[in-house]
Protein backbone atom coordinates (compact mmCIF):
# COMPACT_ATOMS: atom_id res chain seq x y z
CA UNK A 1 0.00 0.00 0.00
CA UNK A 2 1.58 3.31 -1.08
CA UNK A 3 1.92 6.40 1.12
CA UNK A 4 -0.79 8.32 -0.74
CA UNK A 5 -3.27 5.49 -0.23
CA UNK A 6 -2.43 5.30 3.48
CA UNK A 7 -2.72 9.08 3.89
CA UNK A 8 -6.06 9.14 2.06
CA UNK A 9 -7.61 6.46 4.22
CA UNK A 10 -6.05 7.94 7.35
CA UNK A 11 -7.65 11.30 6.65
CA UNK A 12 -11.09 9.81 6.11
CA UNK A 13 -10.71 7.68 9.24
CA UNK A 14 -10.19 10.83 11.31
CA UNK A 15 -12.86 12.83 9.45
CA UNK A 16 -15.51 10.14 9.23
CA UNK A 17 -18.50 11.93 10.76
CA UNK A 18 -19.69 14.82 8.60
CA UNK A 19 -22.58 17.17 9.26
CA UNK A 20 -24.08 18.87 6.23
CA UNK A 21 -25.80 22.13 7.15
CA UNK A 22 -28.33 23.07 4.51
CA UNK A 23 -29.75 20.47 2.13
CA UNK A 24 -30.28 22.42 -1.07
CA UNK A 25 -28.66 21.50 -4.37
CA UNK A 26 -25.10 21.87 -3.06
CA UNK A 27 -25.76 20.29 0.32
CA UNK A 28 -27.50 17.27 -1.18
CA UNK A 29 -24.71 16.81 -3.70
CA UNK A 30 -22.07 16.92 -0.94
CA UNK A 31 -24.17 14.40 0.99
CA UNK A 32 -24.16 12.00 -1.96
CA UNK A 33 -20.38 12.18 -2.30
CA UNK A 34 -19.72 11.81 1.43
CA UNK A 35 -21.98 8.76 1.63
CA UNK A 36 -20.47 7.18 -1.48
CA UNK A 37 -17.06 7.55 0.16
CA UNK A 38 -18.28 5.61 3.20
CA UNK A 39 -18.65 8.54 5.59
CA UNK A 40 -21.39 8.92 8.19
CA UNK A 41 -23.51 11.94 7.35
CA UNK A 42 -25.93 13.97 9.43
CA UNK A 43 -28.08 16.45 7.51
CA UNK A 44 -29.64 19.41 9.27
CA UNK A 45 -32.08 21.78 7.60
CA UNK A 46 -35.26 23.44 8.95
CA UNK A 47 -37.37 22.40 5.95
CA UNK A 48 -40.15 20.03 7.11
CA UNK A 49 -39.73 17.60 4.18
CA UNK A 50 -35.94 17.74 4.01
CA UNK A 51 -35.56 13.96 4.33
CA UNK A 52 -37.69 13.31 1.26
CA UNK A 53 -35.94 16.01 -0.74
CA UNK A 54 -32.50 14.63 0.10
CA UNK A 55 -33.50 11.05 -0.69
CA UNK A 56 -34.90 12.19 -4.04
CA UNK A 57 -31.64 14.02 -4.79
CA UNK A 58 -29.60 10.97 -3.81
CA UNK A 59 -31.53 8.83 -6.27
CA UNK A 60 -30.73 11.30 -9.05
CA UNK A 61 -27.01 11.15 -8.29
CA UNK A 62 -26.73 7.35 -8.39
CA UNK A 63 -26.07 6.99 -12.17
CA UNK A 64 -23.31 9.59 -11.96
CA UNK A 65 -21.74 8.05 -8.86
CA UNK A 66 -21.75 4.64 -10.53
CA UNK A 67 -20.13 6.06 -13.65
CA UNK A 68 -17.42 7.51 -11.43
CA UNK A 69 -16.78 4.04 -10.01
CA UNK A 70 -18.24 4.80 -6.58
CA UNK A 71 -20.42 2.31 -4.65
CA UNK A 72 -24.12 3.16 -4.48
CA UNK A 73 -25.70 0.07 -2.88
CA UNK A 74 -27.34 1.17 0.35
CA UNK A 75 -26.21 4.72 -0.29
CA UNK A 76 -28.32 6.14 2.55
CA UNK A 77 -27.24 3.48 5.04
CA UNK A 78 -25.11 5.95 7.02
CA UNK A 79 -27.43 8.93 6.63
CA UNK A 80 -29.46 10.51 9.40
CA UNK A 81 -31.39 13.74 9.87
CA UNK A 82 -31.36 16.06 12.87
CA UNK A 83 -33.42 19.26 12.88
CA UNK A 84 -31.61 20.70 15.90
CA UNK A 85 -28.41 22.37 14.65
CA UNK A 86 -26.59 22.00 17.98
CA UNK A 87 -27.29 18.29 18.22
CA UNK A 88 -26.45 17.78 14.54
CA UNK A 89 -22.91 19.17 14.86
CA UNK A 90 -22.11 17.98 18.39
CA UNK A 91 -20.14 14.88 17.36
CA UNK A 92 -19.05 15.96 13.87
CA UNK A 93 -15.46 15.69 12.66
CA UNK A 94 -16.34 18.00 9.75
CA UNK A 95 -19.12 20.55 9.32
CA UNK A 96 -19.84 21.52 5.69
CA UNK A 97 -22.19 24.51 5.71
CA UNK A 98 -24.37 25.23 2.66
CA UNK A 99 -26.89 27.73 3.97
CA UNK A 100 -28.39 30.74 2.16
CA UNK A 101 -25.88 33.06 0.51
CA UNK A 102 -26.39 35.87 3.02
CA UNK A 103 -23.72 37.13 5.37
CA UNK A 104 -26.08 37.59 8.32
CA UNK A 105 -27.39 34.03 7.98
CA UNK A 106 -23.91 32.52 7.74
CA UNK A 107 -22.66 34.49 10.73
CA UNK A 108 -25.61 33.28 12.78
CA UNK A 109 -25.12 29.68 11.66
CA UNK A 110 -21.42 29.58 12.49
CA UNK A 111 -21.88 31.33 15.83
CA UNK A 112 -24.29 28.54 16.78
CA UNK A 113 -22.12 25.83 15.21
CA UNK A 114 -19.03 26.98 17.10
CA UNK A 115 -20.82 26.77 20.45
CA UNK A 116 -22.05 23.21 19.85
CA UNK A 117 -19.27 21.60 17.81
CA UNK A 118 -16.20 19.91 19.21
CA UNK A 119 -13.11 22.15 19.52
CA UNK A 120 -11.29 20.03 16.94
CA UNK A 121 -14.13 19.90 14.39
CA UNK A 122 -13.25 21.22 10.92
CA UNK A 123 -15.62 24.10 10.13
CA UNK A 124 -16.09 24.77 6.39
CA UNK A 125 -18.43 26.99 4.42
CA UNK A 126 -19.49 26.27 0.84
CA UNK A 127 -20.22 29.95 0.22
CA UNK A 128 -19.81 30.92 -3.41
CA UNK A 129 -18.39 34.37 -2.73
CA UNK A 130 -18.56 35.65 0.85
CA UNK A 131 -15.17 36.08 2.50
CA UNK A 132 -14.22 33.83 5.41
CA UNK A 133 -12.93 36.95 7.17
CA UNK A 134 -16.41 38.46 7.12
CA UNK A 135 -18.20 35.31 8.27
CA UNK A 136 -15.65 34.63 11.01
CA UNK A 137 -16.39 37.94 12.75
CA UNK A 138 -19.20 36.08 14.49
CA UNK A 139 -16.81 33.48 15.96
CA UNK A 140 -14.97 33.44 19.25
CA UNK A 141 -12.21 31.53 17.44
CA UNK A 142 -12.10 32.82 13.84
CA UNK A 143 -9.01 30.70 13.21
CA UNK A 144 -11.30 27.66 12.89
CA UNK A 145 -13.19 28.75 9.77
CA UNK A 146 -12.17 28.08 6.17
CA UNK A 147 -13.99 28.27 2.84
CA UNK A 148 -14.38 25.08 0.79
CA UNK A 149 -16.27 26.24 -2.29
CA UNK A 150 -17.14 23.42 -4.70
CA UNK A 151 -17.89 23.83 -8.37
CA UNK A 152 -21.42 22.56 -8.88
CA UNK A 153 -22.28 19.71 -8.59
CA UNK A 154 -19.69 18.71 -5.97
CA UNK A 155 -20.33 14.97 -6.33
CA UNK A 156 -19.11 15.26 -9.93
CA UNK A 157 -16.89 18.30 -10.61
CA UNK A 158 -13.43 17.94 -8.99
CA UNK A 159 -12.57 21.54 -8.07
CA UNK A 160 -12.86 22.87 -4.53
CA UNK A 161 -11.52 26.37 -3.91
CA UNK A 162 -10.06 26.51 -0.40
CA UNK A 163 -9.86 30.05 0.91
CA UNK A 164 -8.52 31.17 4.28
CA UNK A 165 -9.70 34.24 6.13
CA UNK A 166 -7.34 36.77 7.65
CA UNK A 167 -7.29 34.80 10.91
CA UNK A 168 -7.67 31.24 9.62
CA UNK A 169 -5.12 28.85 11.12
CA UNK A 170 -2.84 27.46 8.35
CA UNK A 171 -3.28 24.01 9.91
CA UNK A 172 -7.03 24.28 9.27
CA UNK A 173 -6.30 24.95 5.61
CA UNK A 174 -4.02 21.89 5.48
CA UNK A 175 -6.73 19.72 7.07
CA UNK A 176 -9.33 20.94 4.58
CA UNK A 177 -7.02 20.21 1.65
CA UNK A 178 -6.23 16.74 3.02
CA UNK A 179 -9.94 16.03 3.55
CA UNK A 180 -10.96 17.03 0.03
CA UNK A 181 -8.00 15.24 -1.53
CA UNK A 182 -8.97 12.05 0.30
CA UNK A 183 -12.43 12.39 -1.23
CA UNK A 184 -10.92 12.46 -4.71
CA UNK A 185 -11.47 16.19 -5.17
CA UNK A 186 -8.95 18.67 -6.56
CA UNK A 187 -8.62 21.40 -3.93
CA UNK A 188 -6.93 24.63 -4.93
CA UNK A 189 -5.82 26.99 -2.18
CA UNK A 190 -6.21 30.64 -3.16
CA UNK A 191 -3.37 32.95 -2.15
CA UNK A 192 -5.70 35.76 -1.07
CA UNK A 193 -9.39 36.45 -0.53
CA UNK A 194 -11.30 37.95 -3.43
CA UNK A 195 -15.10 38.27 -3.83
CA UNK A 196 -16.51 35.35 -5.82
CA UNK A 197 -13.18 33.48 -5.70
CA UNK A 198 -11.66 32.42 -9.04
CA UNK A 199 -13.93 30.05 -10.98
CA UNK A 200 -17.01 32.20 -10.40
CA UNK A 201 -15.19 35.34 -11.47
CA UNK A 202 -14.10 33.64 -14.69
CA UNK A 203 -17.67 32.45 -15.28
CA UNK A 204 -18.98 35.95 -14.64
CA UNK A 205 -16.54 37.50 -17.10
CA UNK A 206 -17.36 35.07 -19.89
CA UNK A 207 -21.10 35.17 -19.22
CA UNK A 208 -21.13 38.97 -19.28
CA UNK A 209 -19.79 38.99 -22.83
CA UNK A 210 -22.03 36.06 -23.77
CA UNK A 211 -25.07 38.06 -22.68
CA UNK A 212 -23.75 41.12 -24.52
CA UNK A 213 -23.35 39.20 -27.79
CA UNK A 214 -26.88 37.79 -27.53
CA UNK A 215 -28.40 41.18 -26.64
CA UNK A 216 -26.56 42.79 -29.57
CA UNK A 217 -28.03 40.17 -31.90
CA UNK A 218 -24.65 38.77 -32.93
CA UNK A 219 -25.70 35.21 -32.04
CA UNK A 220 -28.51 33.37 -30.30
CA UNK A 221 -28.02 31.53 -27.01
CA UNK A 222 -27.84 28.13 -28.69
CA UNK A 223 -25.39 29.42 -31.30
CA UNK A 224 -23.14 30.87 -28.61
CA UNK A 225 -23.24 27.60 -26.65
CA UNK A 226 -22.20 25.74 -29.81
CA UNK A 227 -19.29 28.13 -30.33
CA UNK A 228 -18.03 27.67 -26.77
CA UNK A 229 -18.35 23.87 -26.71
CA UNK A 230 -16.67 23.61 -30.13
CA UNK A 231 -13.69 25.81 -29.28
CA UNK A 232 -12.51 27.18 -25.94
CA UNK A 233 -14.58 24.69 -23.96
CA UNK A 234 -12.66 21.81 -25.55
CA UNK A 235 -9.30 23.56 -25.36
CA UNK A 236 -9.58 24.71 -21.77
CA UNK A 237 -10.59 21.22 -20.63
CA UNK A 238 -7.00 20.08 -21.20
CA UNK A 239 -5.03 23.35 -21.06
CA UNK A 240 -6.23 26.51 -19.33
CA UNK A 241 -6.07 29.98 -20.88
CA UNK A 242 -2.45 30.71 -19.99
CA UNK A 243 -1.07 27.41 -21.30
CA UNK A 244 -3.30 27.69 -24.37
CA UNK A 245 -1.92 31.13 -25.21
CA UNK A 246 1.59 29.88 -24.44
CA UNK A 247 1.06 27.28 -27.17
CA UNK A 248 -0.55 29.95 -29.37
CA UNK A 249 2.73 31.83 -29.29
CA UNK A 250 4.53 29.08 -31.18
CA UNK A 251 8.20 28.41 -30.35
CA UNK A 252 8.37 31.75 -28.52
CA UNK A 253 5.58 30.73 -26.17
CA UNK A 254 3.62 33.20 -24.06
CA UNK A 255 6.19 36.04 -24.35
CA UNK A 256 5.88 35.92 -28.15
CA UNK A 257 2.09 35.74 -27.94
CA UNK A 258 1.88 38.75 -25.63
CA UNK A 259 4.24 40.79 -27.80
CA UNK A 260 2.62 40.08 -31.15
CA UNK A 261 -1.00 39.21 -30.37
CA UNK A 262 -1.43 40.89 -27.00
CA UNK A 263 -2.22 44.37 -28.40
CA UNK A 264 -5.08 43.00 -30.47
CA UNK A 265 -6.41 41.09 -27.50
CA UNK A 266 -6.16 44.18 -25.31
CA UNK A 267 -8.12 46.20 -27.86
CA UNK A 268 -10.94 43.68 -27.55
CA UNK A 269 -11.01 44.26 -23.79
CA UNK A 270 -11.95 47.88 -24.44
CA UNK A 271 -14.73 46.76 -26.78
CA UNK A 272 -16.33 44.17 -24.48
CA UNK A 273 -19.88 44.93 -23.43
CA UNK A 274 -21.28 45.74 -20.02
CA UNK A 275 -24.89 44.55 -20.26
CA UNK A 276 -27.33 44.85 -17.38
CA UNK A 277 -29.75 42.13 -16.35
CA UNK A 278 -32.68 44.51 -16.60
CA UNK A 279 -36.21 43.40 -17.44
CA UNK A 280 -35.86 43.52 -21.26
CA UNK A 281 -32.59 41.56 -21.12
CA UNK A 282 -34.01 38.95 -18.76
CA UNK A 283 -37.04 38.53 -21.00
CA UNK A 284 -34.84 38.14 -24.08
CA UNK A 285 -32.60 35.55 -22.43
CA UNK A 286 -35.51 33.67 -20.89
CA UNK A 287 -37.34 33.58 -24.21
CA UNK A 288 -34.39 31.86 -25.88
CA UNK A 289 -33.89 29.33 -23.08
CA UNK A 290 -35.52 26.46 -24.95
CA UNK A 291 -33.33 23.39 -25.05
CA UNK A 292 -35.74 20.72 -26.26
CA UNK A 293 -35.80 18.63 -23.09
CA UNK A 294 -36.69 18.77 -19.42
CA UNK A 295 -34.25 20.02 -16.80
CA UNK A 296 -33.91 16.44 -15.49
CA UNK A 297 -33.09 15.10 -18.96
CA UNK A 298 -30.61 17.89 -19.66
CA UNK A 299 -29.03 17.38 -16.25
CA UNK A 300 -28.53 13.65 -16.82
CA UNK A 301 -27.17 14.18 -20.34
CA UNK A 302 -24.77 16.86 -19.11
CA UNK A 303 -23.41 14.63 -16.33
CA UNK A 304 -22.93 11.70 -18.71
CA UNK A 305 -21.06 13.87 -21.20
CA UNK A 306 -19.10 15.59 -18.43
CA UNK A 307 -17.81 12.25 -17.14
CA UNK A 308 -16.59 11.31 -20.62
CA UNK A 309 -14.77 14.64 -20.93
CA UNK A 310 -13.23 14.22 -17.47
CA UNK A 311 -12.09 10.69 -18.27
CA UNK A 312 -10.58 11.78 -21.58
CA UNK A 313 -8.79 14.70 -19.92
CA UNK A 314 -7.63 12.75 -16.85
CA UNK A 315 -4.13 11.98 -18.22
CA UNK A 316 -1.86 14.87 -17.22
CA UNK A 317 -0.54 16.78 -20.21
CA UNK A 318 3.02 16.25 -18.99
CA UNK A 319 2.57 12.47 -19.25
CA UNK A 320 1.06 12.71 -22.71
CA UNK A 321 4.10 14.65 -23.91
CA UNK A 322 6.57 11.78 -23.38
CA UNK A 323 5.24 9.39 -26.08
CA UNK A 324 5.37 12.23 -28.61
CA UNK A 325 8.98 12.98 -27.68
CA UNK A 326 9.97 9.34 -28.03
CA UNK A 327 8.40 9.13 -31.49
CA UNK A 328 10.51 12.05 -32.61
CA UNK A 329 9.94 14.43 -35.46
CA UNK A 330 9.15 12.76 -38.77
CA UNK A 331 7.98 9.47 -37.24
CA UNK A 332 4.30 10.11 -38.00
Image (cartoon, grey):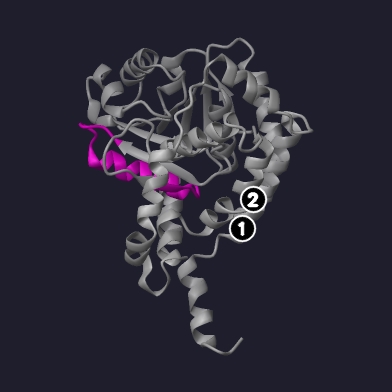
Residue 53 within the magenta-colored segment of the rendering? no
Disc marking residue 307:
2
Cα separation between marks 2 and 1: 6 Å
Q: Circle 2 sits in a helix, a strand or a loop, which is it?
A: helix
State the image coordinates of residue 3 (x, y, percent, origin top left). Answer: 40, 63
Give the crowd class for mark 2: few <14, some 14-19, many >=20 residues within 10 Å: some
State the image coordinates of residue 100 (x, y, percent, origin top left). Answer: 46, 18
Query: On the rendered structure, is 293 left or right of 260?
Result: right
| Res 55 quadrant in image | top right
Quadrant where the C terminus lies? bottom right
Q: Residue at x 62, y 41 (%)?
A: 224
State the image coordinates of residue 311 (x, y, percent, origin top left). Answer: 61, 58
| Res 34 quadrant in image | top right
Disc marking residue 311:
1
Residue 296 can be seen in this image: yes
Tell me if label 2 and label 1 are in contact, CB under 8 Å.
Answer: yes
Total labels drawn? 2
Residue 166 within the magenta-colored segment of the rendering? yes
Q: Considering only vertical position in the picture, is 115 above or below 169? A: above
| Front position in the image: 290 or 141 | 290
Q: Which residues are magenta?
A: 164-187
Amino acid sequence: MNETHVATHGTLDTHRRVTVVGAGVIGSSWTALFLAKGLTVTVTDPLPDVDQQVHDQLQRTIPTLRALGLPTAGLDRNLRFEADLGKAVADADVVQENGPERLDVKRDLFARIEKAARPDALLISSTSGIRATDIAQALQQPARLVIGYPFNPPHLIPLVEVVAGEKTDPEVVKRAVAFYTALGKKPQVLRKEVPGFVANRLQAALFREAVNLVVQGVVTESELDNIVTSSIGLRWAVAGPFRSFHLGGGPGGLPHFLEHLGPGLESLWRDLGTPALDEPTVQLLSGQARFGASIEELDAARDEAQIKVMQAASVPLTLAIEPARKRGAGDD
